[in-house]
Amino acid sequence: MQQKVILITGASSGFGKAVAERLLADGHIVYGTSRKPNADGINQLKMLQMNVSSRQQIKAAVEKILQAENRIDVLINNAGMGISGAVEMATEEEIAVQMGTNFFGAVNVCSAVLPHFRERRKGLIINVSSIGGVFAIPYQGFYSASKFAVEGYSEALSLETRQFGINTVIIEPGDFHTGFTKSRVISQKTLENSDYQKSFERVLKNVEKDEINGGKPEYLAKKISKIVNSKHPKLRYVITPIPLQKLSVLLSHLLSGRAFQWVIRLFYSV
């Protein structure tokens, strides 16, 4: 196995931490980033303080890696967060934070690394989407919107940069048991709205139940390890150990739009 220099955003917890541990075990050189200094570090993981919303911090982090290693082989855009609530009730600030982190954050980091990849005529970008980027999830509207945006951006990126030897991969995880559930921001305006309140509380309860009973992040880390070491990775990977969630992605392509939405409303008790 060829040792690679890998940059992972959002590596202090959840998916990012599990992926970093796995890739380090594979023998790679791994740099992780987080918005705040991480005192509870992983042995051999080189942590950098970096906010994906700050192009200045991203540029400094990328330059630091290039000075130390002279190359970056793989970029994994994992940093993300979730805000739950009715799309009607979302505040301007909530929308900006959700899209700014999940979508523009990935764009910012890609923009910093791509010139290096083009110069070397090689590189791998793995952008973390979600099955919520394949079909919308109720009361996760702007989270889904951010992941739909990641999907479209990644498709265009793949088409434009394949000529330079750059591979772009989109991974679409299902539900996993991570700290994402506890860190989710809940829309108070939705909870206080008499029309949405009861429906929102039912759906949120179902969403959190699925996440708590979801797969272990090590499962996803193992899959990403295989992608990193693949000579010819696919454009998309649906990653979930739960057969029903794999089926949901398939049904989203097979059923008519209204029929599939009926299934989603029934499943989440909207």
Image (cartoon, rainbow, N blue to C red):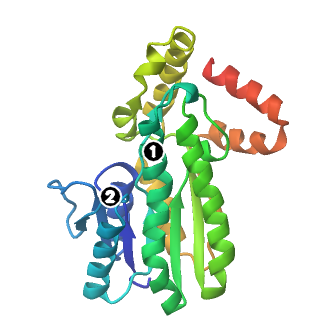
Image quadrant occupied by the N terminus:
bottom left
Tell me residue 220's x, y (percent).
Answer: 48, 54
Pick whichever of labels 1 and 2 is earlier in the sequence. 2
Above/below status of 159 relative to 76: below
Tell me residue 51's x, y (percent).
Answer: 31, 58
Judge from the rendering whether residue 79 lies leftward or rightward of residue 40; answer left or right: right
User: Dot 1, how many residues are within 10 Å of its Cα: few (below 14), some (14-19), or many (20+)?
Assistant: few
Could you say which is closer to the camera, residue 103 or residue 40? 103
Which residue is label 1 attached to? 96
In the rendered structure, which amino acid carries the disc numbered 1? Ala
Residue 34 occupies quadrant? bottom left
In the rendered structure, which amino acid carries the disc numbered 2? Ala
Alpha-carbon distance for marks 1 and 2?
22 Å
Specify whether residue 240 is in view.
no
User: Dot 2, how many residues are within 10 Å of its Cα: few (below 14), some (14-19), or many (20+)?
Assistant: many
Above/below status of 267 relative to 249: above
Which residue is situated farthest in the front direction here? Answer: 92
Tell me residue 79's x, y (percent).
Answer: 40, 55
Residue mark closest to the camera, 1 vs 2 = 1
Judge from the rendering whether residue 264 lies leftward or rightward of residue 201; answer left or right: right
Tell me residue 58's x, y (percent).
Answer: 34, 69
Q: Residue at x 57, y 56 (%)?
A: 150
Q: Residue at x 43, y 25 (%)?
A: 187
Which residue is label 2 attached to? 11
Tell me whether circle 1 and circle 2 mark residues in contact (CB < 8 Å): no
Specify whether residue 170 is in view.
yes
* Element carrying mark 1: helix
Above/below status of 251 relative to 259: below
* Element carrying mark 2: loop
Residue 132 occupies quadrant? top right
Which residue is situated farthest in the left direction here? Answer: 39
